[in-house]
Image (cartoon, helix red, strand yellow):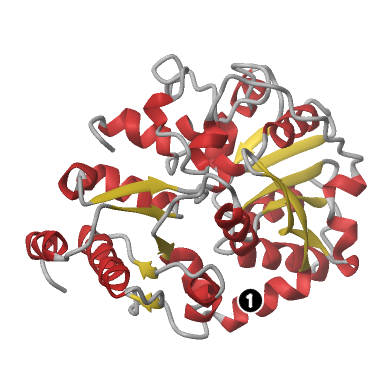
Amino acid sequence: MPESKALLQAIQAVDVPPVTLMEVCGTHTMAIAKAGLKPLLAPKVTLLSGPGCPVCVTPARDIDACLTLSARPDVILTSYGDMLRVPGSARGDSLLKRRALGADVRMVYSPMDAVEVARENPCKKIVFLGVGFETTAPGTAIAVQTAKESGVKNFYLLPMLKRLEPALRALAASADFAVDGLLCPGHVASILGENGFQYVARSLRLPAVIAGFETEDVLLAVYRLLLQIREGAPALENAYPRAVQREGNTLAMATVETVFTPCDSLWRGMGMIPQSGLALKEDYAAFDAIKALDVCFEEEKPSACRCGDVIRGALPPEKCPLFGVCTPEDPIGPCMVSGEGACAARYKYGGSV
């Protein structure tokens, strides 16, 4: 792979007017910020962060439901680390705070850890917060299958998984969408394969390149996108072949299809998007925390937080009126909490990131 300097020179040599590209992966967002790529690419290329952070796209009403659930004395709530710090509708009210006040909230590194917590605590109801995209869905599906096959009846899933394709289609159809090409997420593509992103070029008519996460990976993807834009020929290219195959991980996808079925899902800043979530199939309904524990979701409450606009690429983080007041130490919105959030990247690395 060419070195960064050579790729930057190649990018500047492509004869195109200034373009706007969007990365739809939170890991890309952080990699771009850490490497300081945005100032190096300007003014030829503007990079926007899209809806690629699963914690960030989770609506406040879902966080509120988790907070309510954590107050139940018969429940042990388990989650990935980022989710513990995301505030609900009330500033400062997070699962981390609830844990400090006595709620049994535990950080786990995988859904299987939550199944083990259930085995160790047979008199409690263990709820795993199933957040993520297609990357984490297979592991979540395996945990549910394992619980069923091994007779662990006190394990429950609060399904908040998201499907990327319906969200990108909805985003591209929005009136203020002004993006010339997409850097597609290598993690999700490792599951869905090249075929899982063909719709970007064929249906949305956008140049698309599947990118890895090293600086050279990102720059190579930008360069390939610029060549497509110059030729006026949208296509899908795989610039991450060491991890992404054409067919993807067929076993992982089959496991997800066995346990889950697509459903309508609410996204922060993007509203209810048809078929953009994953619900448990009837065979696994006994493990659905929403049904088994009667979880209620209230209406979204108005907020000055502009994370929804940041997620859509409609607003740079520093233009949010709360930026600087909202900090990683005292976050108001999820984009400042998550290690993949655009606001956290801007705050941590400064400059034009």
Residue 153: where, in percent of width, then height?
86, 56
Secondary structure under the numbered disc 1 in the rendered image = helix
Amino acid bearing label 1: Met
**Residue beneath the point at 24% across and 56% down:** 17
252 or 346, which is in the foreground?
A: 346
Q: Position of residue 215 (x, y in %)?
A: 22, 57
Q: Residue at x 64, y 19 (%)?
A: 93
Which of the 4 quarters of the picture holds residue 282? Answer: bottom right
Q: Position of residue 306 (x, y in %)?
A: 54, 28
Counting labels gives 1
Q: Which residue is mark 1?
A: 253
**With 84 as the anchor, is 347 left or right in this view?**
left
Q: Is residue 319 above or below residue 63?
A: above
Displayed quadrant of residue 76:
top right
Task: Decide if residue 165 is on the left or right side of residue 323.
Answer: right
Left or right relative to 317: residue 203: right
- The residue closer to the viewer here, 132 or 346, is 346
Q: Nearer the viewer, residue 138 or 18?
A: 18
